[in-house]
Image: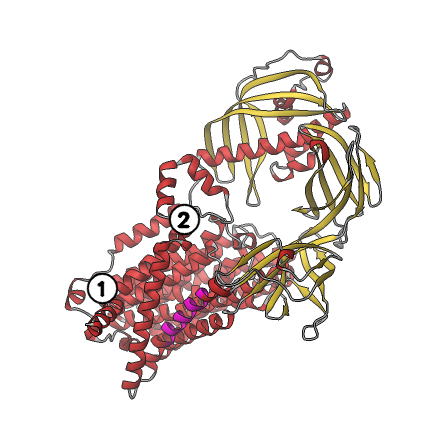
Amino acid sequence: MSPFAWETTLHWSAVALYIAGIVGVAYALIFDRPGRRAGALGLAAAGLLPHTAALALRYVHVGHGPYMMQYEVLSSNAWIAIVLLLLFLWRRPDWSPLALVVLPVSVLMLGFGLFTNPEARDLPPTLRSMWLVFHVLFNKLAVGAFLLSVAAAVILLRKLAGASSPLLDRMPAAATVEIYTMRFVGFGMVFWTTTIGAGAIWAHQSWGRYWGWDPIETWSLVTWLSYAILLHARLFFRVNARATAWGTIACFILSILTILVFPFVFPSMHAAYFQP
Amino acid sequence: MQTINIHSMKRFLRSPAIIMAEIVVITLASVTGVVYPQAGAVDGEALAQLRESLPALAALGQDLALDRVFRSVWFLVAVALAFASLLVVAVEEVRRLFRTRFRPFAPAGGLFIHVGLLLVILAAALKALFGAEATVDVLEGETLPPTSAAWAVQKPGVLVSPLRIANPITLETVDAHRYRGGDLQSLAVRLRLAGDATAPRVADVPVNGSMDVSGVRLFVGHDYGPAALIEWQGKVGEPAKTAALLKHERGRRFEGVLAGPDGESAYLRGSVDPAGNRPAGIEVRVMKGAALLSTSTVRIGETITIPSGGSLTLHGAPFWVRLHASRDPELWLFYFGFTCVLLGVTVRFTLIPLPRLAAVPVRTLSCKHRVDARMPQPAMLFALAGLLGLTACSRPSSAEARKLVERYNTVVAEAYRRGDVKLVDGVVGPNEGKKLTGLIGVHLDMGLTLDSKMLSLDVLDAKQSKDHLQVLTKERWSYCDRRIGTGEQVGEKSEDAYEMRYFFKRFDKEWLVDRIEFATPPQFGREPGTWAIAHGRMQGHAASQAESKEAAKP
């Protein structure tokens, strides 16, 4: 089998295990079988093995990290989101309903990536920088944290709507869920800020300026400012939990557009590095 | 009285409504900066297109400075106001920090964020006032004199003079390596600095690296290529010696154009070898207006004679590279400010229990704010997100379809005119490329080139389905054939009209023409000449397209 065939097989094996994990978690929570929950999350964790192997194989095959093709970027984003989810659930098992949002979104990302052009691209010399590694790594961590914040926001909205089920009742109260939503947003902000900073240093190294209002740079700032608006609105105006949840979802959509859509839409110095 | 004014000013600057308004205005300005075409942006044509297609919006944009939003007065006022608010809030937070006994982290997080942002804005202002940037294209072996005039492009700050290096700098070598597929793998230059004991005498500077000379940073991007050192002797007068810089076209190929005497110009092409070494020879096409005078590959040291009377000698093909210099007195302030922001965000969002974050000194909030202030409705947020989504998912409009058709026709017409089929690589797919290779080759075999001009173009219809785009057009063209060497017209001039259907296909991420066909039979403006009868439907550009259509049939 060619390396690409191995990669594809491993990726699809991971998808199968993640889907099995989703079904398992849904069964455990909806039918109130807490004993099955650990097994279901174990399936999702098992999915990380072929997923990690596929990413490692890709690295060996193309000789660089997941920076250039949508295929690589989406797969690695999904990997980070699932790792963050499982780490959090390991410490807070009661929050397993988060998996019902994070896992499907990650599987969608992974699946979409598998249908994009997987052609290997050579790394241009401007991308040979340690700052690129930080820039990309923290960006992926930010996506993972923001995805967790959205999952918490969705659960918060359900709780505020008065929905009741064994699944929701096991979760902490709405006020706690709201605090955790903001906590995930906060973690995302830390990672997103680091992404912008590492990008600025790298831009100074490669292009001679740390900030140039390039469209993708500007969208990343808009995303950062949008989260700042959300946080300040909550702080100053004590907006209610429902508005906080909707604001979190809107900001997440913006962050995803910034990472996955805008680089392909707006003519930008960054566009040369992103390949669909 | 003055104290009262200062107090009311401070209250105004730290009021939540003003702070929120500042963030929202800066956010909206940033969105405008990416959605509305900006002067001097990467896609420079977008603004011209907007002026052409929506003049009223373009005029309004110009009045509101939307086309240069980040340099507009209203944006700078918003940033200045934000700076003032940050300053007032930071001072307030310092006071609160000293009043707090057991929770030093809580106010410290916000303080670091706000002080950091202040420093970042201050660094940007310092850069605008005291920073400087300069760029120049340098040949291997060339020495830059220690003057500001040595640099082709200068961007000095408002309060400083143009940038200059105190000592002469020589570009000794350019070392470039390419991947097997042709993409650039690495690029490094060796710079020699004369007569400075403090700086390194010789330094290898790769992409992402730099050489520091008395506070000025020298570095290279990825702009480089071979230069053709050409001596061009016209029919009369002294020969002109010029270095024509060839720029990267695709793969290992570089191209450039050189204006010569008597209204002639030379189109130049050189390819580096797989290891990235300099080209041994340069492909040269000499043209006068639309007439192709000569085409040949010239090796270093060779001279070619141009049929019109002159001659052209290639003396060498060294590499050139774009050298950048920048003086950034604010850089460490920016990094320090950014570190503060990062530290503050980390403290604020990871080390402090979140319920405490909601605590805002009550005296900074008016009662009205607490009761009436509302976040935008979720529906509005979703509408915004939806709008952004729509922007992201737009399909090619009629204007975009027209742009694609125009691009194809401009390139193909130029390829026929220069007898150079390699020009079409970026606009056609493999099928159409093969056909054009044959058709242009037939012309060259006959000693002819085709000089065509589009007189009118109307897009009648455009349909898209995923990776396929079909565009129906109505076109009018003027054609004439010219003899290679003299440029004299062969046969009659012709004006033809037809409807054409273009089948674009997305290859990688580019729309390329896969095939074309007539939608209605062409109306030729001339009778077929002797040569045309001998070669069937070889009836200019339109007939070439007809050839393509015939060839496309199963």
Front position in the image: A198 or B266: B266
Q: Which residue is mark 1?
A: A160
- Where is the C terminus of chain B found, in terms of image quarters? top right
Front position in the image: B86 or A43: B86
Front position in the image: B92 or A106: B92
Residue B396's place in the image compared with A51, above or below, is above
Front position in the image: A218 or B79: B79
Q: Secondary structure at mark 2?
A: helix
Image x and y of residue A186, in percent: 37, 70
Residue A92 visible from this viewpoint: no
Bin the neighbour count of mark 1 within 10 Å (Cα to Cα): few under 14, some 14-19, many 20 and up.
some
Relative placement, left or right, of B492 versus B32 is right
Query: Mark 1: which amino acid?
Result: Leu
Q: Report the coloring of the rendering.
A: secondary structure
Q: Is residue B115 magenta?
A: yes
Give the CA separation, mark 1 to mark 2.
36 Å
Q: Chain of mark 1?
A: A
Q: Chain of mark 2?
A: B
Q: Which residue is mark 2?
A: B35
Image x and y of residue B78, in percent: 33, 60
Residue B141's place in the image compared with B94, above or below, is above
The residue lying at 37 percent from left, 50 percent from top is B388
- Where is the N terminus of chain B found, in terms of image quarters? bottom left
Boundaries of the magenta span: B112-125
Residue A51 visible from this viewpoint: yes
Q: Is residue B192 magenta?
A: no
Image x and y of residue B121, in percent: 41, 66
The residue lying at 56 percent from left, 25 percent from top is B454
